[in-house]
Amino acid sequence: MALRNIVKIDEEKCNGCGQCVKACAEGAIQIINGKAKLVSEVYCDGLGACIGHCPQDAITVEKREAVEFDEEATKEHLIKNNKAKEKVDFVCPGTMAKMLGRKPGEEVAGITAIPSALSHWPVQLKLVPPSAPYFADTDLLLVADCVPFSMGDFHSRFLKEHSVVVGCPKLDDAEFYIEKLANILRANKLRSLTVIHMEVPCCFGLTRVAKDAIVRSGLKMVFEDVTVALNGNVSKTEIVKP
């Protein structure tokens, strides 16, 4: 152990965008469960090249007792994880917050396309920055990711003039969802929250995510809970008070 500079990551600020992963030439940082983490002190040289690439100001360099940087171990680590790093490099650019828009009647390959009602990107709850501009003073949809496939009129009926985040309460980390949604609620003044999920039992977990996130945020609000049948029809709508 030696007293030296080493990277420190504030997980509360981190939105999992992965820009620091791309900036770290030593491969010392990885995205794990939606958050940037220092995988080993051995791989971190403490120079902090990743700091300027973090849009959330979540990275600093601190001086503390740490295992010394090992150049040879780092080279071996980079060789073993080359494919994984390439995968991260491919995915990460798509996490940048963007406002979208398509003009009605736009032609795509000679065919007049039905305009999308999606107003922003990204939409995955794991990837969206809580402070993204499209969350400010908006009506937010929290949607199970199977819903838009079952509902033929999802865009015109629900998505139009709304912001949206999507996820799967069965396959993903519910605790991460709760904390992420709570951060969105704290950082923005939402006009309303609507939860839309399928009628299958596991999908109702999204309702619990919304309830727990509201409680954790410290806000007092209700939300509309919409249940969608497998045939794409809305089977039930109710107002939920956490």
Image (cartoon, rainbow, N blue to C red):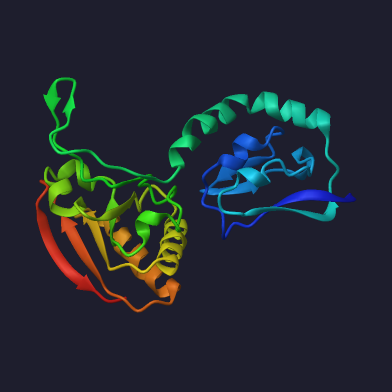
Q: Tell me where residue 213 sits by quadrant.
A: bottom left
* Farthest residue, direction bottom: 220
Q: Quadrant of the C terminus?
A: bottom left
Q: Residue at x 55, y 41 (%)?
A: 18
Q: Position of residue 27 (x, y in %)?
A: 68, 35
Q: Tell me where residue 106 sits by quadrant.
A: top left
* Farthest residue, direction right: 2
Q: Position of residue 83 (x, y in %)?
A: 57, 25
Q: Position of residue 32 (x, y in %)?
A: 56, 45
* Farthest residue, direction top: 109
Left/right placement of residue 168 relative to residue 146 reads right
State whether residue 235 is above or below residue 122. Answer: below
Left/right placement of residue 142 relative to residue 79 reads left
Residue 122 shows in the view: yes
The residue closer to the viewer here, 113 or 231, is 113
The residue closer to the viewer here, 159 or 214, is 159
Q: Position of residue 230 (x, y in %)?
A: 14, 47
Q: Residue at x 53, y 33 (%)?
A: 88
State whether residue 166 is above or below residue 95. Answer: below
Q: Residue at x 35, y 79 (%)?
A: 220
Q: How many marks?
A: 0
Q: Tell me where residue 150 sits by quadrant.
A: top left
Q: Residue at x 14, y 31 (%)?
A: 113
Residue 38 shows in the view: no
Left/right placement of residue 101 relative to residue 37 reads left
